[in-house]
Image: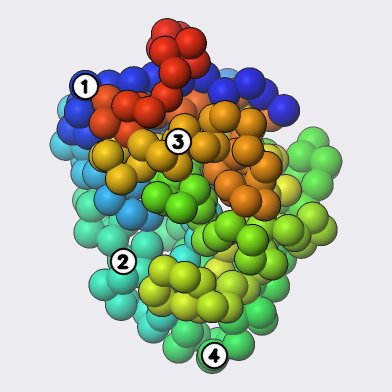
């Protein structure tokens, strides 16, 4: 378990731009050292803002997009192409404008896909895809992602792990279906905390006053069942990227900013 580090930016635009620059560096470094890189994307306004900033960054051309694996932390279980699906929004923000290898873009199944409305079968299928990508060096059923990004919800949820719901209590499976999520749509597919913790680095993104209380709770020693964001951490680094509004309820003792 890595101790959380905090970086606080003046506003959400600067946060998105800085996070995009940081992500470019991490991907390029991973490709230089291991030949390829793997990143887990998040949806929501902060995740999509980061992708849009990456799309606009001149340095994006430093990435070898054909040697990048993209995964998702969660997905709304809706038909393919639905505008509310994270993959649809990611394609619009960035993915359709860069030369990715389609075989390395690992979207979660849609509700009109081969598993139909069976969200548990869809989750099992994604778990199997992750297991196939994991090598002996990963020591588990998921790859060791270079960076896994998570948006933090006002209720402290990350991915589709909501406080007190069964998915946040899962300790064995890497991917599960979610029923009755308090945020629409109610049916989703999500990575579990054990899968999240397989990442080398976990980045939690929070911007806006509506995220201030969630950040304060998650960073104050709360339990992961009541505050899922508190249970999201990386093997070597856990990085909270916030704007000033989201950090407004944190005690100053929790930061200066982390180093790059």
Q: Is residue 217 left or right of residue 184?
A: right
Q: Which residue is mark 4?
A: 117
Residue 30 visible to the viewer: no
Quadrant holding the C terminus? top left
- SS assignment at label 1: loop
Asked if the residue under mark 1 is in contact with the one under mark 3, i.e. CB atoms within 8 Å, the reply is: no
Q: Marks 2/1: CA distance?
A: 29 Å
- Up/down of 238 relative to 190, above or below: above
**Residue shown at the point (46%, 53%) measured from the top left:** 155
- Up/down of 170 relative to 2, above or below: below
- SS assignment at label 3: helix
Q: Which residue is mark 3?
A: 215
Whichever of callouts 3 and 1 sits on the residue coming sooner in the sequence is 1
Quadrant holding the N terminus? top right
Whichever of callouts 3 and 2 sits on the residue coming sooner in the sequence is 2
Mark toward the viewer: 4 or 1: 1
Mark 2 residue crowding within 10 angstroms, few (<14) / some (14–19) / many (20+): some
Whichever of callouts 4 and 1 sits on the residue coming sooner in the sequence is 1
Q: Which mark is residue 10?
A: 1
**Residue shown at the point (44%, 18%) measured from the top left:** 251
Q: Marks 4/3: CA distance?
A: 34 Å
Q: Which residue is mark 2?
A: 88
Whichever of callouts 2 and 1 sits on the residue coming sooner in the sequence is 1
Q: Is residue 108 left or right of residue 183?
A: right
């Amino acid at each position: 378990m890595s101790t959380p580090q905090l970086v606080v930016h003046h506003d959400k635009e600067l946060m998105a731009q800085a996070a995009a620059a940081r992500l470019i560096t991490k991907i390029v470094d991973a490709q230089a050292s291991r030949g390829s890189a793997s990143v887990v994307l998040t949806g929501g306004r902060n995740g999509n803002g980061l992708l849009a900033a990456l799309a606009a960054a001149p340095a994006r051309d430093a990435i070898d997009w054909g040697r990048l694996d993209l995964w998702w932390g969660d997905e709304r279980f809706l038909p393919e192409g639905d505008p509310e699906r994270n993959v649809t929004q990611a394609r619009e923000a960035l993915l359709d404008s860069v030369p990715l290898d389609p075989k390395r873009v690992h979207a979660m199944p849609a509700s009109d896909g081969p598993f139909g409305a069976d969200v548990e079968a869809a989750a099992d299928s994604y778990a199997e895809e992750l297991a196939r990508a994991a090598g002996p060096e990963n020591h588990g059923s998921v790859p060791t992602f270079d960076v896994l990004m998570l948006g933090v919800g006002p209720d402290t949820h990350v991915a589709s792990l909501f406080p007190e719901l069964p998915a946040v209590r899962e300790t064995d499976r890497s991917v599960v279906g979610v029923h009755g999520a308090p945020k629409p749509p109610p049916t989703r597919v999500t990575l579990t905390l054990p899968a999240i913790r397989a990442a080398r680095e976990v980045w939690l993104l929070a911007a806006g006053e509506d995220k201030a209380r969630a950040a304060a709770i998650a960073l104050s020693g709360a339990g992961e069942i009541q505050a899922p964001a508190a249970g999201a951490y990386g093997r070597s680094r856990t990085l909270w990227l916030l704007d000033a509004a989201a950090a407004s309820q944190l005690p100053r003792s929790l930061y200066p900013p982390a180093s790059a």
